Image (cartoon, rainbow, N blue to C red):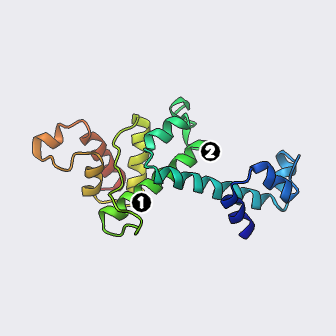
Amino acid sequence: WLNVQMWVEMRVTEAYVKQELGLAGLAGKTLESHPNYKILKNFKYAREGRELDELLEHQASTKFLWEDLRLNEVEPELLKTTDAFKTYVRYANKVDEDIWRFKTGAFHQNHLFEPKVYYGGSPEEMAVKLELWAKAKRPGWYVKKLLYIDALEGTALISHPHYAYYQKFLDLRGK
């Protein structure tokens, strides 16, 4: 574990880590069956986490990452099976947790300002966000705020285009 953290901090390449672990030149089943393969996987996960934390520090939108990972080009039925999707979900959860902590007063001491809330994304991306919010058991007031419909009431609320997303969230959450 210590080596993994050190490698992440030093920003070494995957090739370097493979060399250090005796995995250079291995592929497929040979690579995956090697006793050090788990360490390589831990390194890749930790490095990705650091990269996502840096995106979070720069307040990159989830929409940016969705497009950067080219998830808009993946067939909907294959979307959830891709590594890129898993990366997106990991980041979207980080963003959501950051906003949630700020909105509920449990924010990190390094936040001087409210995390930026970006609304938007393709219908596919919005469906994923709704699932994440429902799974995290976010309250309705919070989701309304993220959908920019928190100040609306009555007919103005119900007729707003984002209200359909809110209804979908309620359905996913089980009201």
- Which residue occupies 72% across, 60% down? 7
Quarter occupied by the N terminus: bottom right
Query: Is 140 displayed left or right of 6 in the figure?
Result: left
Place of residue 3 in the rendered image (x, y in percent of width and height, measured from the top left): 75, 66
Label 1: state its secondary structure.
helix
Does label 1 or label 2 sit earlier along the sequence? 2
Category of crowding for the residue at label 1, using alpha-carbon neighbours closer than 10 angstroms: few (below 14), some (14–19), many (at least 20): some
**Viewer-side residue, 147 vs 128:** 147
Label 1 amino acid? Answer: Glu
Place of residue 164 in the rendered image (x, y in percent of width and height, measured from the top left): 27, 40
- Which residue occupies 39% across, 37% down? 121
Q: Is residue 160 above or below residue 73?
A: below
Query: Is 28 displayed left or right of 130 in the figure?
Result: right
Query: Is 2 displayed left or right of 80 in the figure?
Result: right
Q: Is residue 121 above or below residue 111?
A: above
Provide the residue designation for mark 2: 83
Which mark is drawn over residue 120?
none
Label 2: state its secondary structure.
helix
**Viewer-side residue, 61 vs 77:** 61
Of tags 1 and 2, which is closer to the observer?
1
Quarter occupied by the C terminus: bottom left
- Which residue occupies 17% across, 37% down? 159
Provide the residue designation for mark 1: 97
Separation of disc 1 and disc 2 at Cα?
A: 21 Å
Label 2 amino acid? Answer: Asp
Question: Which residue is at the far left?
Answer: 154
